[in-house]
Image (cartoon, rainbow, N blue to C red):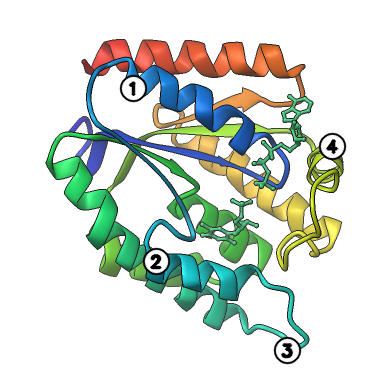
Amino acid sequence: MSQPGLWPRFISLEGGEGVGKSTNLAAMAELLRATGRELVVTREPGGTPLAEDIRQLLLAPRNEAVAADAELLLLFAARAQHWQQVILPALRRGAWVLCDRFVDATYAYQGAGRGLDTALIDRLAELVLQGQGPALTLLLDVDVATGLARAQQRAALDRFEQEQLSFFERVRAAYLVRAQAEPERIRRIDASQPLAQVQADVAAVMAAYIEMCE
Ligand SMILES: Nc1ncnc2c1ncn2[C@@H]1O[C@H](COP(=O)(O)OP(=O)(O)OP(=O)(O)O)[C@@H](O)[C@H]1O
Ligand SMILES: Cc1cn([C@H]2C[C@H](O)[C@@H](COP(=O)(O)O)O2)c(=O)[nH]c1=O
């Protein structure tokens, strides 16, 4: 591992709503498959049958207000299952793991977005992950209005996508602060560019990283 606890073959993809994660994930997966190693492509919340059930609970719009602590605990319940059943075994057998969102999302959405104490998130992360995580995180960054406009082109909005603009501004700001604090791990990609340029930037970061690792 490059830094204690960070798995070189574990890569996460992050960003606010509609930044282009799904659009870029396939190309990232192709580059990793070309190494000839096993690749596990997964997502959070989700990635196992139980964690996907929790995802449904979290994303479905509902009349009942969801307590921020309840949301946080559900996310970590899903993460614990995903980590133990899928991610950690894959990393231990030498596979690449490409994950659409991971723990950075919790600091951005539940920490900054919902206003939960980051010390509480630290404690849950320590309990579930014991300091382990991705050695590379690509942060797709675009202004909130553009991202939401892109997200709204699709199907009905989920419970998170129905939040206020100010929520997403806090989420974006938190992601950017984390990227500044950990520039080696978190690489910001300007996702306001035309898709072809975003994909070229993603490919350049990935190719350099794979070459360094393999
Ligand atoms: N750089 C870009 N320029 C213009 N449109 C883009 C760009 N990247 C993605 N899109 C379009 O924006 C929409 C949202 O993209 P995508 O579903 O990949 O986002 P996402 O980050 O996965 O969203 P979410 O996390 O909310 O599911 C899609 O219609 C996609 O084609
Ligand atoms: C992992 C994680 C996710 N979320 C939120 C962020 C998104 O709104 C949804 C996931 O849907 P998407 O298809 O990836 O856009 O879940 C969160 O609030 N906290 C988290 O830790």
Q: Residues within 10 Å of mark 1 (few under 14, many from 20)?
A: some
The disc labelled 2 sits on which kind of residue? Pro
Q: Are marks 4 and 2 in contact (CB under 8 Å)?
A: no
- State the mark number for residue 67: none
Q: Please tell me the numbered disc located at residue 146.
A: 4
Splitting the image into 4 quarters, where does residue 112 fall? bottom right
Q: Circle 3 — which element?
A: loop
Q: Earlier in the sequence, mark 4 or mark 3?
A: 3
Q: Position of residue 137 (x, y in %)?
A: 45, 35
Which three-letter amino acid code belongs to the residue tagged 1? Arg
Question: Looking at the image, is 92 positioned above or below residue 84?
Answer: above
Q: Give x and y (percent) for residue 206.
A: 43, 18
Residue 160 left/right relative to 125: right
Earlier in the chain: of badge 3 and badge 2, it is: 2
Q: In the figure, 10 relative to 199: above or below?
A: below
Taking the spot 46% from the left edge, 16% from the top edge, the residue there is 205
1 and 2 marks in contact (CB < 8 Å) = no
Q: Quick one: label 1 or label 3, which is nearer the N terminus?
A: 1
Quarter holding the N terminus is top left
Residue 33: numbered disc: 1
> Badge 3 is on which residue?
64
For the point 70% across and 26% down, the residue is 191
Disc on res. 49: 2
Question: Would residue 180 be found to the left or right of residue 16 on screen?
Answer: left
